[in-house]
Image: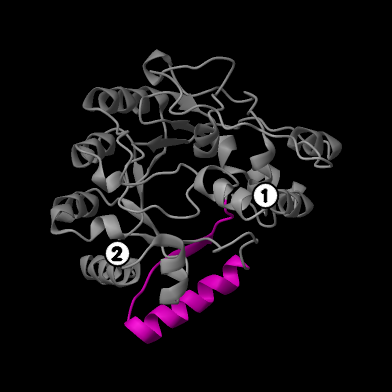
Amino acid sequence: MGCPQKPQTQTPQLGLEKFSSALKRHGLKLDRTRCRILQVNVGLICDLCCRHCHLMAGPHRQEAMSAQTMREVVNFARRGGFEMVDITGGAPELVPGIEGFIADLAEVVPHLMLRSNLTALESPERENLLRTCVKHRVALVVSFPALREAQVEAQRGSGVWEKSLAVLHRLNALGYGREDSGLQLHLAVNPGGAFLPADQAATERRYHRELQRRWGLVFNNLFTLTNMPLGRFRRWLENSRNYDAYLSKLASAFNPAVVSGLMCREQVSVSWDGYVFDCDFHLAAGICQGEKLTHVRDLPGPPPQGTPIATADHCYACTAGAGFT
């Protein structure tokens, strides 16, 4: 047991200011407020090998949260007093026992959120999971990175476009994304290459208009996400000789105004094998929370307010432009 993978080497880039130094220069520090959100990465198994994946998830990965670790996470959620659990992966839909895990969490936490790549929900085998999500009013955050088939499949693989549209229709039929249903459906959009995302508000308006006009689809909100220079996306950046330029672009777009609202300030992240990290990106990089690797079963509760949060160069992605808030 231990960190889910060997820490990714943080290679210093010539001329790039360390993220910690950028914070200091602006008179800022990164520490926790009250920890409201428990993020749980239930595994790295996935039906896709998306080019932007910071975890290098895919069908070849076998890492998945065990039933014992699920029980330990539920116990931690109970004693931690969290307001929300954010379930992510890989493709959480493919992890054995996910339905029971959601049901158990629903008994101890008021709000649940499940991140989906859409295609993993396409199989009839996922109907029980969908019923579980409807029953417990689980909010869904689904990946739909573009409004054109070619762009989506260049990033996520052949056949993804039609499956994604089919699943969105199925979710709408269940009530997801529809007014007054209580079933929230949010879209996650990230760029296809080494550039920053477009304006979120304008992108959301365009998606609302085009999805309704072209396919009769509806959703609640849209989030634009900056690609993390980690995992498979980092490998692509390095192979295309874009890594240094991309980091410089992120650092140049550093926005000190978003630091106070960064999501890491009010959450803690748990890996598929039960270890604790500041965020899912630090999990991918192997940067553990605190001074030593700690298992969730050994924590009396979440990190207290004022606990420092580790930093690395990839943190520039969270503070570029509008940031991850």
Q: Nearer the viewer, residue 164 or 296?
A: 164
Q: Is residue 252 above or below residue 205?
A: above
The reply to whether the C-beta atoms of the residues labelled 2 and 1 are less than 8 Å apart is no
Which of the labelled discs sits on residue 318, or is there none? none
Q: Is residue 65 above or below residue 240?
A: above
Residue hosting label 1:
243
What residue range appears in magenta?
Answer: 199-227
Q: Nearer the viewer, mark 2 or mark 1?
A: 1
Task: Where is residue 64? Give x, y as percent.
Answer: 29, 34
Task: Where is residue 142? Give x, y as percent.
Answer: 38, 58
Residue at 27 percent across and 28 percent down: it is 70
Separation of disc 2 and disc 1 at Cα?
38 Å
Q: What SS does tag 2 mark?
A: loop
Task: Where is residue 294? Give x, y as percent.
Answer: 46, 16
Residue at 41 percent across and 29 percent down: it is 81
Q: Is residue 81 above or below residue 152?
A: above
Which of the labelled discs sits on residue 176, or is there none? 2
Residue at 36 percent across and 28 percent down: it is 77
